Image: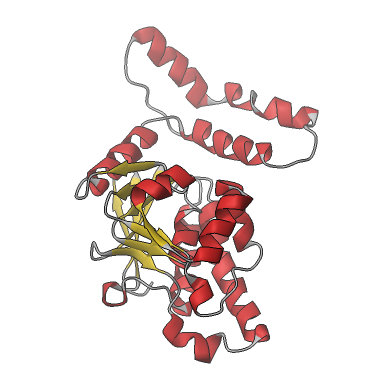
Amino acid sequence: MTDSVLLAHAGDIATVTLNRPERLNALDLAMWQELAGVMAGLAGPNGPRCIILRGAGGKAFAAGADLAEFAAVRATPEAAGCYGAVMNRALSAVRDCPLPTIALIEGVCVGAGLELAIMCDLRIAGAGSRFGVPIQKVGIVMPLPEIAYLVELVGHATALEILLEGRVFGAIEAKEMGLLTRVVPDGEAEAETFAAARRIAEGAPLSHRYHKRLIRRCLDPRPLEPSDLAEGFAVCASQDYAEGLAAFRDKRKPKFEGR
């Protein structure tokens, strides 16, 4: 692992940090590749119970993709397609991670940085954070499937507003649009995010995994099958379910093991 994507553990909470503060954590091609690998490594059965994704330096979550390298790595439709495939491996690694994920947002979160943040399950931001996708100013198009994730979260009308105007806007407006889960006063985003991660980590890991899968299934337009309905009850065969009931009965804190 290079020093452009950092991984740290605090007990059962992992923090993945985009570490190019001198570039406001703008993601270059190498960082997209590194991020995909880091996320894949965390997704195993012995991984943490919650993952926090953040930017280094306190001034930015990520100021988009690094446009400075586009002339070299994204100059033609073919090259852009190859770049997009790498980028989407990273985005999908976050979006499809079976573990709960939280974006801790301080400062600038625009362009591909915002795309990355919306791949997380929760997004907690300081009130002074700034958001937007001003890519129309350099003639870039948000391609599929990336644009589908934005539409899924905020709806087609708001997605068009964000992309056509290219405005950079504040955290309160971002919350109203549906881009954010929670807005807190500046200086409190880190504490609030870690508190949320702790609440998640203390819950049953299997419950979280099933909830992520079932909510994703709700977005699938196919009719529900009997197997889909049964999946919501499968956890009742787990050790965690037995432990949860026993802890409730004994009036103690449960000790979940994810089995």
Q: Position of residue 61 (x, y in %)?
A: 34, 62
Residue 44 in view (yes/no): yes
Q: Vertically, is 30 above or below 248?
A: below
Please state which of residues 254 and 3 is positioned toward the viewer in this rendering.
Answer: 3
Q: Position of residue 26 (x, y in %)?
A: 38, 73
Q: Position of residue 94 (x, y in %)?
A: 50, 56
Q: Vertically, is 242 above or below 83?
A: above
Q: Residue at image x 63%, y 35%?
A: 214
Q: Position of residue 24 (x, y in %)?
A: 31, 71
Q: Residue at image x 55%, y 26%?
A: 238
Please state which of residues 81 and 31 is positioned toward the viewer in this rendering.
Answer: 81
Please state which of residues 51 and 138 is positioned toward the viewer in this rendering.
Answer: 138
Quadrant (top left, top right, bottom left, bottom right) of the N terminus: bottom left
**Left or right: where 161 falls relative to 113:** right
Residue 96 in view (yes/no): no
Q: Residue at image x 51%, y 21%?
A: 241
Q: Residue at image x 52%, y 30%?
A: 207
